[in-house]
Amino acid sequence: MRVVLAQSLLTWKDRTLEMRAVRVETLINSLPQQREDMIASRLDEMVGILPEGQLIRIVGSDGRQLFPLDTPAASPALSYANCAAPVIENDRTSSGRYRLLCHPIVYGGASASLIIPTSLVENLILLGNFTSALYKVAPLLLVVSGIGGYSLSRKALRPVALLIREARTITGKDLSRRLPVPQAEDEMRRLALEWNDLLDRIERAVGRVTQFTADASHELRNPIAYIRATAEFNLNTPSLSEEARQGFQDILDETKSTSELLENLLTLARADAGCAPAEVEEVVVGLVIEQVCTRMLPLANDRQHHLIWRSESASSPKIQINLLHFRRLCMILLDNAIKYTPPGGTVKIAYQCHDGLNLCISDTGVGIAPEHLPHIFDRFYRVDAARAEVNQGVGLGLPIAKWLVELYGGDIRIESRPNHGTAVLVHLPTYATD
């Protein structure tokens, strides 16, 4: 800013010098060139009324000063030189700094140079005051400009922040949400429209996959049920050979596994479709857990496990949940604990009331390596070979358990170490005690 101001002041000074030179030259040209005395007299009158007129000089081509003939003693020692073309330059003397215009003219019928100086003191004072004021105001200007720039940037980026915030709420569980479309016809509007169009295509693609999974699982249930019934019927035939009986038993075992897989696929298809539980009722936690443990006790005894279930609360809590969902959650977690615990191990179910229902299913089984824990709830994820040897499933039990827990606003997590057992911790937030 200081440079711009300095240049503007110099430009104004130069324009003033040129105007004075035009006035002086016009006066000289209007008088007879032979009457130098008359020209000198009229010039004396003009320089008397011009600002800094006493500094005006006329120099001949030989360097001799033609006007004024007598130079005042107080005049600054400026460099008066002849010039062939108009030129403006600076000059510094002991009394200050000056700006000089040298302009070629005709004086007394001969070539001469008109030199018109002007002091730069006013410019220097103005620039000094401006610089001083700028240093004083600069911190305030920086603060104001910073606040203004921050406010403008916040205002400009507000639509971006809004789009980011809305985009974070869109998950695979709810693809129906869309980004807000700004009203302004700008790039942000085009971006939002393109993203919404992309989400439409993704939602349709996921919907087709989900529908196909549900339809395929549903259509396969009847053939599987028929194959299972046929195998069970033939196993009851007394005259069946031992080889045929073993073949039908293998078919029956495979149909049971396939039926379980189809049921799990249907459950996950309903979860992807956003199906909520139809009936929610008050469920006594202790009673359901006792029923599930009683049902799983033969499997635990067959593997020589110690199955323990107990409540750590004074009274049995009650929760608002779909009974079938809660029973299936307990069955999945207990079945996993029994499957992955070597013979002679211990499987324990404990529950208590503290800011909701806290359920813990722990075992002394083979455990899970740390690198597998982040993926344990992924669909069809299979862990290491040690667990695969006893795993008869396909990796859908825990994803279903996670969906059931999150359906009621709860959370589920797993703590495990290889060869030190596994603990599944479930928290359901809503409960009521007797």
Image: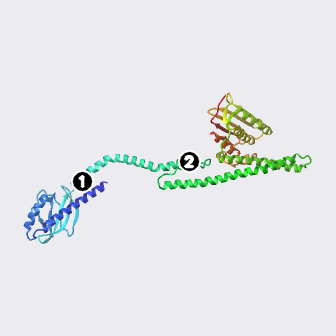
Report the quarter where the N terminus lies: bottom left
Residue 173 in the image: above or below residue 362: below
Question: Which circle's residue, 2 or 1, is located before the other in the chain?
Answer: 1
Q: Amino acid at mark 1?
A: Leu
Within 10 Å of the Cα at label 1, are there few (<14), some (14-19), or many (20+) other Cα atoms?
A: some
Pointer 2: what residue? 168
Q: Position of residue 339 (x, y in %)?
A: 75, 42
Question: Image quadrant of residue 3?
Answer: bottom left
Q: Residue at x 68, y 44 (%)?
A: 400
| Residue ID for mark 1 | 124
SS category of the residue bearing label 2: helix
Q: Residue at x 44, y 48 (%)?
A: 155
Q: Secondary structure at mark 1?
A: helix
Q: Give the left or right position of residue 336, taking residue 245 as reference.
A: left
Colour theme: rainbow
Residue 264 in view (yes/no): yes
Identity of the amino acid at label 2?
Arg
Residue 393 appears anywhere in the view: no
